[in-house]
Amino acid sequence: MLRLIQTLLALLLLAVPAAADGLSFTGTVVYRERIAAPAGTTLRVSLVTLPEGQPVVGASGTVPANGHPPIGFVLNLHSDVARHGTAFGLVAELLGPGGFAFASVAPVPVDVTAPAPVVIDLVRAPAPPPEGEVPNPAPVLPEPGLVDVLWRITSIGGKPAIGERPPTFSITADSRAGGNSGCNNYFAEADFTDGLSFGPAAATRMACAEPLMAQEAALFAALAAVANYETDGESLRLLDAAGIPLIGLVPLED
């Protein structure tokens, strides 16, 4: 037997005349995981516009302790949305203690002129952060002209790069940086959260002439001090926190 959650709504978010229509949406929410909703879980069902997904009205109800899907709901509205000629859909989310969180991926279209029972599929969603805690920001991605380009290092700390084999540098789309110092291959992690910075560089251990080893050490020290970058499409400059160029680069010609 379905566990029924009565979600009554009195608040109207649309301007309506005195004689507004009453609407009643019924249905169930389901998810594939074989786990019960813990005590204290809340189901929220909302009516949204299509295709924008803008919320119109919604209501919440508490799921019975250890409730298993499918979980039934009734969403009663006192509104004239049927007269607006707009397409609508229903979305739902389940939020409970211990990181229990499920949400619909996309709205389920509904006919507000003749509501019929619907099934809303939910998928596991990231749990909301504790109250007062700021969620982790979305990762900042590099601009397309910077990644997946093999650069030739032309200068380090204001000094021209040396060596028969030009030192190189590149960043992949998943923020892995590296190249060849003119002696050893090196690797580092790039971080675009606030400008551009690099984690500690790791390198192979081949011994080279002293000038090349000194250049390699200068390159790794410069990478550790990088705080930002600038590019004009034809060259790239890795900058320190004061905006002073540390490493100059141009695309490596084939």
Image (spheres, helix red, strand yellow):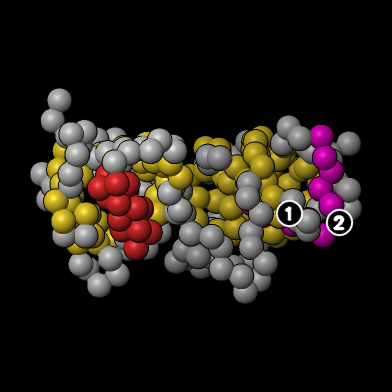
Q: Residue furthest top?
A: 254
Q: Are marks 2 and 1 in contact (CB under 8 Å)?
A: no
State the residue at coordinates (53%, 39%). Answer: 106
Residue that carries the numbered disc 2 in the rendered image: 39
**Disc 2/disc 1 C-alpha distance (Å):** 12 Å
Assess disc 2: are there few (<14), some (14-19) or many (≥20) residues with their C-alpha within 10 Å of its C-alpha. Answer: some
Q: Quadrant of the N terminus?
A: top right
Nearest the eye: 242 or 158: 158
> In this view, which residue lies farthest toward the front?
210
Task: Kindly tell me whether residue 151 is visible in this rendering.
Answer: no
Residue 112 image offset from top left, x and y in percent:
53, 44
Q: Position of residue 99 (x, y in %)?
A: 73, 54
What amino acid does circle 1 point to?
Gly
Q: Is residue 223 left or right of residue 97?
A: left
Q: Per the image, is 106 magenta? A: no
Secondary structure that dominates the magenta span: loop
Q: Position of residue 181 (x, y in %)?
A: 30, 41
The residue tagged 1 is 99
Quarter of the C terminus within the rendering: top left
Which picture quadrant has residue 15?
Answer: bottom left
Question: Residue 38 at what x, y percent from top left?
Answer: 84, 52
**Which class describes the residues within 10 Å of circle 1: few (<14), some (14-19), or many (20+)?**
few
**Three-letter amino acid code at the position of disc 2:** Ala
Classify 119 as above or below 38: above
- Side of 87 relative to 91 (left or right): left
